[in-house]
Structure formats: C-alpha cells, structure tokens
Amino acid sequence: MEIDSKLPNLSVNIFTQMSQLAQEHAALNLSQGFPDFDVTPELTALVKGYMDKGFNQYAPMQGILALRERIQNKVLKLHGARYDAQTEITITSGATEALFAAITAVVNPGDEVIVFEPAYDSYVPAILLNKGIPVFLEMKYPDYHIDWNEVRDALTDKTRLIILNSPHNPTGKVLDHKDIKALGQIVEGRPIMILSDEVYEHIVFDGVSHLSMARYPELKERSFVVSSFGKTYHTTGWKVGYCLAPKSLSMEFQRIHQYLTFSVNTPIQLALADIMAQEDLYLGLSEFYQKKRDHFLSLLAGSRFRPLACQGTFFLMLDYSKITQEKDHVFARRMTIEHGVTAIPPSVFYHEGKDHRVLRFCFAKKNETLETAAKILCKI
Ligand code: PMP
Ligand code: GLN
C-alpha cells in the first residue's frame, strides 16, 4: 500500500536527527532544546500526589479551570491584558498542538501566511496541510531584525495570517516597541490575524522586556498567543502548553483542539496550577538563564567561534566561519562525530537552506556540561 504524501519534501526533523547522531557518537547534545537538569522535586511530587489521589481521568476539553485561572491572573499582572478563563484560554498538548490548531482554525486553501525565516520547523507543515501558501520573508542577518517595509510589500488581499515568534528560536531576537508599532500599522484595517509564538516569554536578557501581543488591544483582538510550560518549568517532555485568544477565535480554536487531542492530561495540569502560585519560579527564569548564557560566553571567549547577539531563549548562535567554510549541516555532523559536541544547523529553518556559517547551541544545560562542551569547542 502506498500513501500519496501531503508533505513529500519533509523528512524526520532536525531535532530528532541531531539528537540521534549525538547519541550514536556519545556526544554532548547541545542541539535539541531541552534542559539536562531536572525539574524541581516539588513539581514532580505534586503530579505524583494528584495521581495517587485519583485525579487520573479526563480533564475538561478547555483545560483544568484552576490552571486557566492562574494563567488569566498571570497575563493580567504581567501584561495588563484580560482574558476570560472560561472562554479565552485553552490548555494544549504543548505549544506544538496550539500552533497547529491556530493555523488550522485560520488558514483556508489559497490563504497566504507570512513566515519569517529562520522559522521554527512546525509552522510551514501546518500551513501546507491546510493548503495555505507560506510567504517567506527573511530576518536580516546578523542581528535578525524584521524589515517591516518588506512585510508591507508582501501583503496581498489573500494575506490571512502573520506568524511571529519572540523571543525567537533559533536567533534569540526579541521584538521591540518599534516592531510592535510597525506591525500595528500594517495590520490596521486589514483582515489579517496574528499567531504569536511566545514559548520563551520568561527568558529574556539584559533588561529587555518581552512584549506580548496580549499587551496591545488592537493586536490582541486578532491574535492567538501561544506558550509552553515545557520551557518555563524545565519539563519539555510533559508537552503542556496554552493558547490565549479572544472569545470568537478561541471558539474556533477549541473546535479543532477538541478533535486533535480533546484534553490534556489531568494530574500535570493540577500540579502546574499549584506551582504557578510561586511567581518567582517564572519571574526568576531570565536571571537563571542569563547566568548560563554569560557563563557559556565567557568559557568560549578564547575560541574561534564568534557569538551573535542573544536577547532571549536558551539558544546561542555561534559563527564558525574562522574555522571552516563547510556548510552548516556538514560541519554540525562532523563536529558531532570528530569532536563530540552536537549543535543545530540553522539552514534547516530556511525553505531555501540559507547558510550563514553559524550553528545554534542550547545552553539549557548544567554548568559542567557547558564547561566540558566549551573546552572542546575552544580546541576546534
Ligand atoms: N515554538 C518554539 C519556538 C519552540 O522552540 C518550541 C519547542 N521547543 C515549540 C514551539 C514547541 O513547544 P512544545 O514542546 O510545548 O510543543
Ligand atoms: N523546540 C525544540 C528546539 O528548538 C525542539 C522541539 C522538538 O524536538 N520538536 O530544539
């Protein structure tokens, strides 16, 4: 039997490929974005406690209300934005499901979707499966800013959605007030929605603020704001995220969510609702990761790798052009096999494989891991 593939040009994603290669060669895995340190035992104890107390059946389709209320309060406090926990917040199977559901809710065949490259790998497949047309625009190397004039020029009467990601994976770029103003002017009076991937919302550095779409009423009314507990609580394997959107958008979103997963596992949602009461856990995350970024940077100071700016996320882009002119995916593989450190080649985040001779390193790692990796990198 054969299937006529709907995604014929896509193979196993880069995170799976590189993590597998790292494993095969017992390399330090700084490729796929996940911490190598553990979650706070308090959180796992809460999950276990709820399981032991019998909270093991279906959660409501929209998510456990206590968790939605915590999110409602957090977003109100941080961004001054009101979302109704009853109708405007949905708990999802990671941000990945939320992104898929939002794109499916909005994109009809022939609709154009603006995607900024380098782009996280799950956006385009979701657009294509819904028969939408990705319209690619490039963030400008080396600081990866968006040229808003290009965005304006790319608009047509078929433009339906703009996908944004700030703080940005893989570049660490964070949108600023000028970006928000330009975006506001561009969408004003047009039937264009925004999908804002904010999974690294709590990881921003050097006093930079995360400007959520939720903050701006004229953007909020047309936005799906997506986040992930995986990044915030060091639990990428739990796959729990959420989506904020005004009522009419959330209704359509939930129609899809209901048939994608129906609901997300119960004990983890209950535990997350409890742990969210400790605001310092997410408010302290930027400082925690800034220390890791700076430690890694100082360890690399004598190396031939040149760091690019990193305003947020737990990824650092390193230019390796002083070492070799090999393509990024070739060097990433060779570095794994010959030197025992694995990173992500960002050319995979461009539809035409643009290659700036940089690699993405995940620094959500124990200090020992970063130190061992840096020692190796300094010798390359
Ligand atoms: N968006 C971005 C930018 C990401 O980096 C990731 C994964 N780390 C996701 C979405 C998916 O998040 P989740 O693991 O919660 O599905
Ligand atoms: N978001 C993670 C990263 O960028 C990986 C997620 C995945 O493996 N699909 O590394």
Image (tube, rainbow, N blue to C red):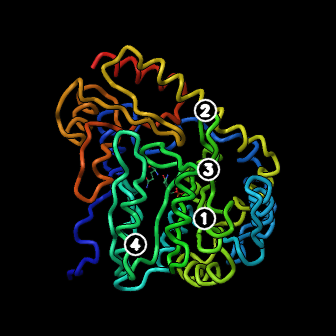
Residue 52 can be seen in this image: no
Q: Which residue is mark 1?
A: 225
Residue type at mark 4 is Val
- Residue 139, position in %: x, y? 37, 51
Q: Quadrant of the C terminus?
A: top left
Q: Earlier in the sequence, mark 3 or mark 1?
A: 3
Per the image, label 1 sits on a secondary structure element best described as: strand
Helix, strand or loop at disc 3? loop
The image quarter containing residue 352 is: bottom left
Q: CA distance from mark 1 to mark 4?
A: 16 Å
Q: Which amino acid does the dot numbered 1 rest on?
A: Val
Say if residue 183 shows up in the picture: yes
- Work out whether mark 4 precedes mark 2 in sequence or the reverse, and give the earlier one: 4
Q: Quadrant of the N terminus?
A: bottom left
Is disc 3's CB within 8 Å of ligand 1?
no
Residue 135 numbered mark, or none? none
Q: Which residue is mark 2?
A: 206
Q: Residue at x 59, y 55 (%)?
A: 238
Residue that mark 3 sits on: 201
